Amino acid sequence: MQDITDLPFWRLLHRYGGPDLYCTEYFRVHAHSVPERRIVEAITGNDTGRPVVAQLIGNDIPALVRTARFLQQLPVAGIDLNLGCPAPVVYRKCAGGGLLRDLPRVDALLKALREVVRVRLSVKTRLGFDTAEGFEALLDLLAAHPLDWVTVHGRTVSEGYRSPVRYDLIARAAERLPCPVIANGNLHSAQQALAVHRQTGVRGLMIGRGAIRNPWLFAQIRTCGNGAPKPVPRGRDVLAYLHALWEATAVPGLTERGQVQRIKKHLNFVALGVESTGRFLDGCRRATRAAELFALWEAHLDHDRPLPLEPLPLPLGERDLLAGVHC
């Protein structure tokens, strides 16, 4: 996730178990682009012991080829082409999810990348742009290329994160594609993630927002997958996580107010699992000083009661960035 899942956050997740594979924030690729230094440094500085895939976003074939060649000189396990980003600033440039409106361009991009990528080449996609009616045609296109895996987010680009995830269409992709398929979208608990894994027949799971809210999630999935009860954090465990998150998101030279604003990107997701009235979320959003945040965290989390960190039905405005289906 852009501006969130950087190297300090990988290191923090790793303390709680972490995923089997990390994916970088996306490299913005265009005719005059240079790979972003901080993302390059996340790759070269990765000390989690887990492999990293470099994610590209763009539509310029020579630039994507040039960038893929450069990144393969770094310790990457693979190159991933993003066909799913639903941000308007991205798709309006016919990049990310916008490419799903131009399948011939996607075909040309994949052909060019496969010719130069010697590590694993993967794609992350959505079901379509406005509708999923063309999903079968998209699967036909993807099947025609020797990809190492495809990650499917079970919504269209236009749906963003607000509608239910079409796990049935993810299952269709797993059935149709000759390569492994990874499921993505609203994987919010160990039991639900394992159920999606069984029902869809996918080979793996990609988790983003759920891992920000619950860094224990990867370890919980592994534990439940082995038939053991999942470990459930308690209030003070989550409190300690938030303080560790504060340290992980700190940027040298950033003002206190700037640091408070920076961590709010993460707190938006964490707050969904803390309490159901919206007071915790509202307090996090209104805070301007560290002391305000820390006092709020203490008031809500200084206890030993179990806290499953699954999404709660908070009262949210229709245009709130968290509004939509989370479970």
Image (cartoon, helix red, strand yellow):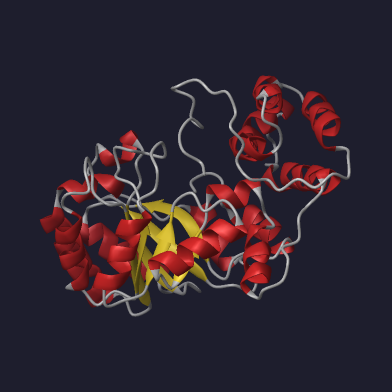
* Residue 87 visible in the current orientation: yes
Query: Residue lying furthest right in this view?
Result: 303
Residue 32 horizontal/vertical position (percent): 29, 49
Residue at 41% across, 36% down: 162
Question: Is 17 positioned to the left or the right of 20 in the image?
Answer: right
Q: Is residue 70 above or below residue 55?
A: below
Residue 183 horizontal/vertical position (percent): 42, 61
Q: Is residue 156 above or below residue 264?
A: below
Residue at 69% across, 27% down: 284
Query: Residue lying furthest bottom in this view?
Result: 118
Of residue 227 and residue 75, the one placed in the foreground of this image is 227
Residue at 45% across, 34% down: 324
Q: Is residue 279 above or below residue 11?
A: above
Question: Is 139 positioned to the left or the right of 240 in the image?
Answer: left
Count of numbered badges drawn on the protein: 0
Of residue 87 and residue 164, the one placed in the foreground of this image is 164
Question: Is 310 positioned to the left or the right of 114 in the image?
Answer: right
Of residue 8 and residue 132, the one placed in the foreground of this image is 132
Residue 305 horizontal/vertical position (percent): 84, 44
Residue 234 horizontal/vertical position (percent): 82, 48
